Amino acid sequence: MKEAAITSLIQWAKNEGAVMDLVEVKYCGEDRGCGVFAKKTIRLNETFLRIPKHLMITAGMVADMPEYKNILERHRVEAFSILVMFFYLESQRKEDAFFHPYFASLPKTFDTPLAQNYVDLEKKFTMEELPKRAMELLMKQKNEFIYLREQLSRVLDTRHIDIPHLNWAWHVVNTRCVYLENPEHPLVENSKLTDTLAIIPVMDMLNHSPNAQALAFFDKHSNTYCVNAEYRCVNEGDEIFVCYGPHDNLRLWVEYGFSIPHNIFNRVDIPNNVLFALAAAIGLDVSEEKKRIIDELAIPNTMYLSDVKPSFGLQKNVSILLMSKMELKDVKNRIYGADATNATLEVVYRIIEHLKGLLEKRVRTALPTFKHFWSEQVELLQNIINQQSDDGDSD
């Protein structure tokens, strides 16, 4: 059934002017969905996919359709909400609708936390089980969904919104939209958010990877959305990936329902209040003045899996914690004017070691489903600690 839907989608897209002779779309099973594969070797910088503009679903395109124009002349709605409304209504149209082949190829369900637990999100997940940032992302999503539901109830003038179907439409847009600078449209509300969203049939079958071979972009000369082998050639039979953004596994799980082993965008966030607690735990003087200065400078302490040493922010903030009252009077020149001293770095690594120990406790107590979120943070910190040892061995 899924293979037939993909075949119909590709034939429809080609009939409408899409160019994709070098690639094919395959269904890879329920756990992976669809992917785009090279039918023959694709050379570096070679364009292998072109989708014409009239197949690109944007808020402006929707606003020009008579039915939606009538709605949007009476209500001011942002681009994201317009797209969700479009998928909510159009998916119920007859099979002769223009975009039906695309709708027929879309997944029927999603694996994100919001898709599975949109009614009792807070009961299903707690701060004890998940890192703070994951909970913040989850609650942000839930609030956005509630806002959208209330907004579309007003716009469509109905109290009988099909919540599961709206949840599906929201996920289609949230998981498949890409960045595109759209021209201003009088019926698209953009006073707070510029309209930079589009959903591109077929192109959205390309899966995400931090180590992508390809880049997607809009070509103004041909008026098509293109994908080319920007970063390296693609061998025949290989799946082709693009990078949709620097997403760590927490965000990938919340937004898309999956994670990637050894994701180079994985990160450990150390809010200032956590840094202060860690510093105090290893015996540093954490005065109110030092806290105030660090908060005012607002240099993030975040570290990434791709880092080979402690982040700039963590080094500088720790150097402030080690300053005397006299040194604090010239704090900006001191932190920006020189590299961290060996003494500062030694304290930084002590803080990292202490944090790693706390995270290891979370690994031991976490539910199996969420254990990897904590262990990935331990892995990241251990990599940085190992790099210190390697540097020491080479001296």
Image (tube, rainbow, N blue to C red):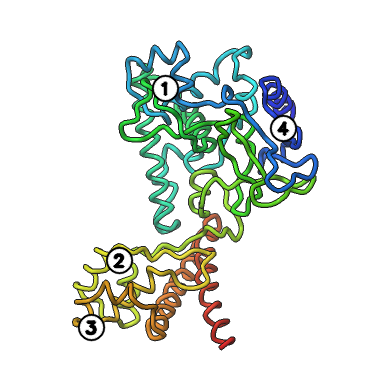
Q: Is residue 180 above or below residue 280?
A: above
Q: Is residue 289 above or below residue 306?
A: below
Left or right of 382? Residue 9 is right
Q: Which mark is residue 20?
A: 4
Asked if the residues shown at circle 2 and circle 3 are in contact, with their CB atoms under 8 angstroms apart, the answer is: no
Q: Which is in the foreground here, disc 3 or disc 4?
A: 4
Q: Secondary structure at mark 3?
A: loop
Disc 2: which residue: 273
Separation of disc 4 and disc 2 at Cα? 52 Å
Looking at the picture, tell me which residue is in the foreground, 288 or 332: 332
Separation of disc 4 and disc 1 at Cα? 38 Å
Who comes first in sequence, dot 2 or dot 1? Answer: 1
Q: Which mark is residue 324?
A: 3
Q: Residue at x 70, y 39 (%)?
A: 36
Q: Which is in the foreground here, disc 4 or disc 1?
A: 4
Q: Residue at x 55, y 82 (%)?
A: 391
Neighbour tally class for label 1: few under 14, some 14-19, many 20 plus, Cα within 10 Å:
some
Who comes first in sequence, dot 2 or dot 3? Answer: 2
Neighbour tally class for label 2: few under 14, some 14-19, many 20 plus, Cα within 10 Å:
few
Separation of disc 1 and disc 3 at Cα? 62 Å
Separation of disc 2 and disc 3 at Cα? 20 Å
Asked if the residues shown at circle 3 and circle 4 are in contact, with their CB atoms under 8 angstroms apart, the answer is: no
Left or right of 128? Residue 369 is right
Q: Secondary structure at mark 1?
A: loop
Separation of disc 2 and disc 1 at Cα? 42 Å
